Image: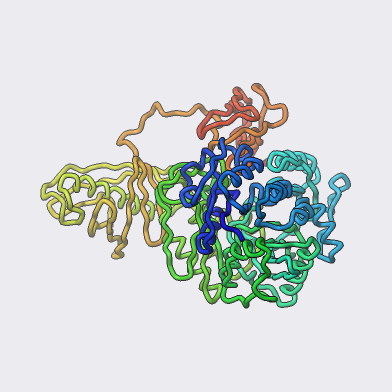
Amino acid sequence: MITSLLVANRGEIACRIFRTCRALGIATVAVYSDADAGALHVREADTAVRLPGSAPRDTYLRGDLVVAAALAAGADAVHPGYGFLSENAGFAAAVQDAGLVWVGPPVKAIELMASKTRAKELMAAAGVPLLAPVDPAAARAEDLPLLLKAAWGGGGRGMRIVRELNHLEGELTAAAAEALSAFGDGEVFAEPYVERGRHVEVQIMADEHDGVWALGTRDCSLQRRHQKVIEEAPAPGLDDGLRDRLHTAAVAAARAVGYRGAGTVEFLVADDGRPYFLEMNTRLQVEHPVTEAVFGLDLVALQLRTAEGEPLPAAAPPHPAGHAVEARLYAEDPARDWQPQTGALLSLDVPQEPGVRLDTGYTGGDTIGAHYDPMLAKVIAHAPTRTEAVRLLARTLERARVHGPVTNRDLLVRSLRHPDFVAARLDTGFYERHLAALTPAPDESAVRLAATAAAVAEAARNATATTPGSARFGAWRNLPSQPQLRRYRSEPDGREHEITYRTTRDGLAVGTEGFRVVCAGPGRVTLESAGVTRHFDVLGRDDRRYVDTATGSYAFTALPRFTDPAERTEPGSLLAPMPGTVVRLAEGLAAGSAVEAGQPLIWLEAMKMEHRILAPATGTLTALHAAPGLQVEVGALLAVVTEHADHDPEASEETA
């Protein structure tokens, strides 16, 4: 019997596992890096053990330190969560060798499924349908497009799509380098890339008494950089024959390796309806809550039960009910190549309506660092029908208050309301086709209205300081005043807005035509525009202003009245867009090198992603400060490109 459980993970998944442990009367142990010393999972655990350092390779990827932490804290079991060491057979063996219960599949099953190439061979023998592999050395034009994949690990690392044969060699090199950096093994394989394919998976739960459950399907097709963004259960639009075929193949895969515990068998479903095995994840998936919602189960509780040697509660799983959709809230900017964002998270408030679930590793006041995945939370909605679940999730996200770094919240809302998603026309190319439409420039009139609300709230704050307790329209001092000016820069688009106002005997007069102040306070403003009354909640922190409305949220930086002409950046400067580590440079890159506009020059790794720094113009690299292994802060100068004086930008755009 498990009495004390160490979770060899961090953030959202650690907090989620602790929740089940509390319900079952199991004591909890957290491990944490120096960067996570004040993290929510540390605060929620009964006991916590420090892993010195901040980088994953020094902390959460050190299996020896994690096992030692479990023993030191008196834990009798270890749950790996997902990511990090969750699919590391050596770690699972070390846990068991230390006399601890491993809340995961057998070591042999992890070993057999750890390599995608070896797993495919095993699945072929079990009769599971597969895509035929392609030898990159013998690839021909008719084999294109190809998908290059790392043989070990997941999360989209080491994956590349190749559409032109002359790009194959370079992409193989890049994929192998990324795989080696992420997983310690540079093995890469190639298979046909299925255009408009759907990512559909089956949740498996198995015990050591020959019981295996196939817990329905999930669709995880909406992905960015081969990482999932929105998932749902059951996968919509599958006929009964295909659904049964996927269930049968998943059970066969589990039995082929003597599986125990929670696992996921992933498939690619082509647009002709044919399924192909992708891989088996020998762990709990990030998206497991949608399966829990429709089946009314706690998968973590079942993991603990099977780890204790107990059978599954019944020969067959319960009947599913309704539909569930999950959205991953990331600290990232989708409009800027999905760049991860860091900084203080001032607020994270998600409406807790019936049918809504929030899984998170953060609360307001926490700091989002640069060392780990940028996912802030998962928001899940469950309802009787898909239409109701999608609508509930979109509205919940729209009403959420998320203040601090830029997030993908608006993208999620627009994705859930996009006609293709509403109609369940799903495939892994969704964001490739629709990203521009899903990240439009902000509506100028709506932004200006929000900026006006920020200025009015600031005026109310000043008035409240003069007359304590006053926070409504009638509280303004009964004297005319000179016009006041407020300047704001809307984030992240960088546009500047000037708002003028003055106090009068009748209240507050705003210099923007058509706006009337109905009431005003430091934190809430009501404005009328074109006969429509709207409420605005305003939060001020230092020089930032966050304005939330019923249909959107806006962030501003308060600017001084006059700009500083000395604030200039040297033309052609390449600055680090986020804190991270330089992992490699373009081959032969050095000061004096000739570069082409748009050419990748520097690769920066941050928050489990690689980001390319591109040449801003055709010219000469006149300075290079970056080197592999260099850790940089946001805004650090990496290089300088001096544009050729005789360069014709229009010609280069046509060539590109």
563 left or right of 616?
left
On the question of residue 651 being in view, the answer is no
Q: Nearer the viewer, residue 513 or 364?
A: 364
Quadrant, the C terminus: top right
Quadrant, the N terminus: bottom right
The single residue placed furthest to the right in the displayed view is 138
Position of residue 531 relative to residue 557, above or below, is: below
| Residue 361 image position (x, y, % from top left) | 50, 52
Q: Residue at (67%, 54%) from the top-left corner? A: 102
10 left or right of 88?
left
How many labels sit on residues? 0
| Residue 105 image position (x, y, % from top left) | 71, 58
| Residue 340 image position (x, y, % from top left) | 54, 44
Q: Residue at (36%, 30%) from the top-left corner? A: 564
The image quarter containing residue 625 is top right
Q: Nearer the viewer, residue 3 or 408?
A: 3
Q: Nearer the viewer, residue 225 or 114?
A: 114
| Residue 220 image position (x, y, % from top left) | 64, 61
Position of residue 402 relative to residue 231, above or below, is: above
Q: Residue at (53%, 76%) from the top-left corner? A: 384
On the question of residue 372 being in view, the answer is yes
Q: Identify the colour scheme used.
A: rainbow
65 left or right of 331?
right
